[in-house]
Amino acid sequence: MHGSFLFGLGMQALIGTSQLLAAIVLQIAWRTDELTELANWTGNALKTQTPDPIAASLLRQIHDFSLHPQTFWSVYLIGHGLLNLSVVAALLTKKPWAHPVSMLVLAGFIAYQLDRYWLTHAPVLILLSVFDFVVILLVWNEHRQQRLAAKA
């Protein structure tokens, strides 16, 4: 299980780093009007859409994303990325408070992501929530193992 815990932390660090990079790319795209061009392209494509429901759904999601304010996603990605990396760092340095705080932070992510899911129906939020839940289970198991080892 310790190997799974370390793998989960590695994935959490990778996700956190990816989120920070995505926030930077999003800000660049937003400031250079790339998202406006994407909205125009997908809007035109939706007008002449084929009967393929999957392609139409994907185009609609891209179009809707490119029209909405990007501030939420940038702040969310930066905050989530930094918190993910902080959780990983605290757990790897074996701070005594790291396990309970990490589980609370990840539970907060899940609550927030599910709340946002009900508003946006973005499937990525469900995937992130499931992954965060698995990491909570791994952190809890690691914490339990460390406490048992300390008692022995």
Image (cartoon, rainbow, N blue to C red):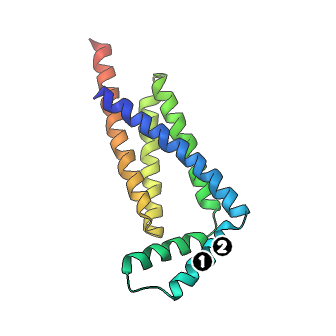
For the residues bearing labels 1 and 2, Cβ distance under 8 angstroms:
yes
Q: Tell me: residue 84, above or below residue 41.
A: above
What residue is disc 1 on?
Answer: 41
Along the viewing direction, whichever of 41 and 26 lies nearer the viewer: 41
Q: Residue at x 57, y 51 (%)?
A: 77
Farthest residue to the right: give it: 32
Q: Position of residue 33 (x, y in %)?
A: 71, 68
Distance from Cα at disc 1 to Cα at disc 2 = 6 Å
- Provide the secondary structure element on which disc 1 rests: helix
Q: Position of residue 88 (x, y in %)?
A: 48, 33
Quadrant where the C terminus lies? top left
- Provide the secondary structure element on which disc 2 rests: helix
Q: Residue at x 39, y 58 (%)?
A: 126
The amino acid on which the numbered mark 1 sits, given as a three-letter code, is Trp
Q: Residue at x 38, y 55 (%)?
A: 127
Residue 5 shown left or right of residue 49 in the figure: left
Q: Residue at x 65, y 61 (%)?
A: 71
Whether residue 97 is visible here, answered yes or no, is no
Q: Dot 2, crowdedness within 10 Å: few (<14), some or many (≥20)?
A: few
The amino acid on which the numbered mark 2 sits, given as a three-letter code, is Glu
Along the viewing direction, whichever of 29 and 67 lies nearer the viewer: 29
Q: Position of residue 19 (x, y in %)?
A: 55, 48
Name the quadrant containing residue 149: top left
Q: Position of residue 42 (x, y in %)?
A: 56, 77
Along the viewing direction, whichever of 7 and 133 lies nearer the viewer: 7
What residue is disc 2 on?
Answer: 37
Q: Tell me: residue 37, above or below residue 8.
A: below
Name the quadrant containing residue 7: top left
Residue 149 shown left or right of residue 80 in the figure: left
Image mark count: 2
